[in-house]
Image (cartoon, rainbow, N blue to C red):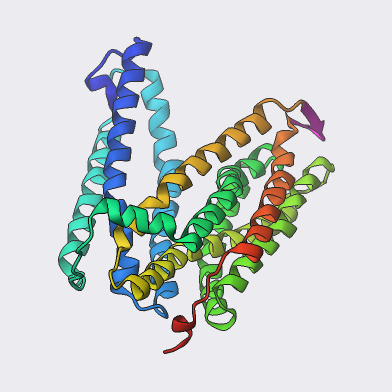
Amino acid sequence: MPSLMIDLSSQNAVFIWLLIWYIIFNISYAVTTPFSAWMTEQFAVYDRPKASQFDNTFKFFGIAITTVFSMLVVTALIDKIKENPDIIPPDFFYCVIIFGILPVIFYYLVTFLMPTEPYFKIESNIFQNLKTILKNKNYILATLMIGIASLAWTQVGSLILPFTEVVLVFEQTYYIIAAAVFVLGILFFLYIWRRMLRKSGKKRSMLYIFLSSIIFLPFTLLGLIPMESTFIYGILFILGIAGSLAGWFLLPPVVISDITEDDEKTTGELKAGIYTGFYCIPLNIFQALGLIIMGITIDFSPDITVGTSTFSIGYVLWGPICSLILIVAYLFTRKFVHLDFEWGKKK
């Protein structure tokens, strides 16, 4: 609701407004990062996949609510705002207030209801801990694995639904169905991957996740073939990608937690906070690089016409590009990364 505070006709004012709120949001979100350490502190090794599944389930329920709200409510409100940007529709104002209050309520509700984590005596300081984790070769390799794969996953998550809209030319009803299949598919495959973790182990499951993505992603090239109806192809493709993404959303927090506990068994001190927080720094860098690659692929590729649709050829090339990146991640993981520990195999 910037019109209540600034002059919307000034580009500089709007830019500064957006920059300030973007910084505030990222600072606020960063404060929640240490709480991811609860995965290690609160849950035993066999419970972590289930905890990660619950975590991701609630995340995607939130995404589903946001998507439905955006399509059914915000779209109509945007038209009213465009007519007169200086007047904030009451419905929009109340929605902003409600969505601003809900996270605070839920946060404090969880804070009061969740058991207090066990007390872990910490004798070393942050610099000693940082030195320790940088000497942990397997942790560095796992962080690099997550970063390399994120070059692809960032693009996949950003382009999967635009692909259905731009290349497959889904109308609104088909688009809503595709979005629902995507979210429900992820929720379903979270359960499947959790079961596979127990049966096959973390490293083999991670390799299966990479392999399934490597196989499915090049099918974006079918968007170059004119089809009478793209609906069935689009839904099957989205379901395949949802299956791969679900595994990826499930595993990294579990992997980092296990490596953290393995370090505790060696050093005698649990460093869940710094292990969880540090890997997010290179992860964010790799994610940013992934977005840069995506922008270059989409913006600097020539336009082509398939049937009645004209689009950048980058909208079909991103699949094979991400597949190649994940081949590198697969080979790197298979060769260098250790994800299953002997102590974790004992109940």
Range of residues picked out in magenta? 303-310
Position of residue 94 measured from the top left corner of the image (x, y, whole percent): 24, 39
Quarter of the C terminus within the rendering = bottom left
Judge from the rendering whether residue 154 lies leftward or rightward of residue 13; answer left or right.
right
Judge from the rendering whether residue 116 lies leftward or rightward of residue 344; answer left or right.
left
Count of numbered circles on the image? 0
Give the prevailing secondary structure in the magenta stretch. strand
Judge from the rendering whether residue 260 lies leftward or rightward of residue 152; answer left or right.
left
Position of residue 304 measured from the top left corner of the image (x, y, whole percent): 79, 29
Looking at the image, can residue 159 be seen? yes
Name the residue nearer the viewer: 75 or 268. 268
Judge from the rendering whether residue 293 lies leftward or rightward of residue 343; answer left or right.
right
Q: Residue at x 49, y 56 (%)?
A: 140
Query: Residue 120 occupies which quadrant of the picture?
Result: bottom left
> Does residue 286 lie above or below 139 as drawn?
above
Position of residue 118 measured from the top left corner of the image (x, y, whole percent): 20, 73
Q: Residue furthest left?
A: 112
Looking at the image, can residue 84 be seen? no
Quarter of the N terminus within the rendering = top left
Indicate yes or no whether the magenta region holds residue 256.
Answer: no
> Does residue 49 lie above or below 239 as drawn?
below
Query: Residue 8 occupies which quadrant of the picture?
Result: top left
Q: Residue at x 42, y 54 (%)?
A: 134
> Does residue 214 lie above or below 288 as drawn?
below
Q: Residue furthest bottom?
A: 347
Name the residue nearer the viewer: 61 or 300. 300
Indicate yes or no whether the magenta region holds residue 309.
Answer: yes
Position of residue 176 measured from the top left corner of the image (x, y, whole percent): 56, 49
Name the residue nearer the viewer: 149 or 282. 282
Q: Residue at x 31, y 57 (%)?
A: 129
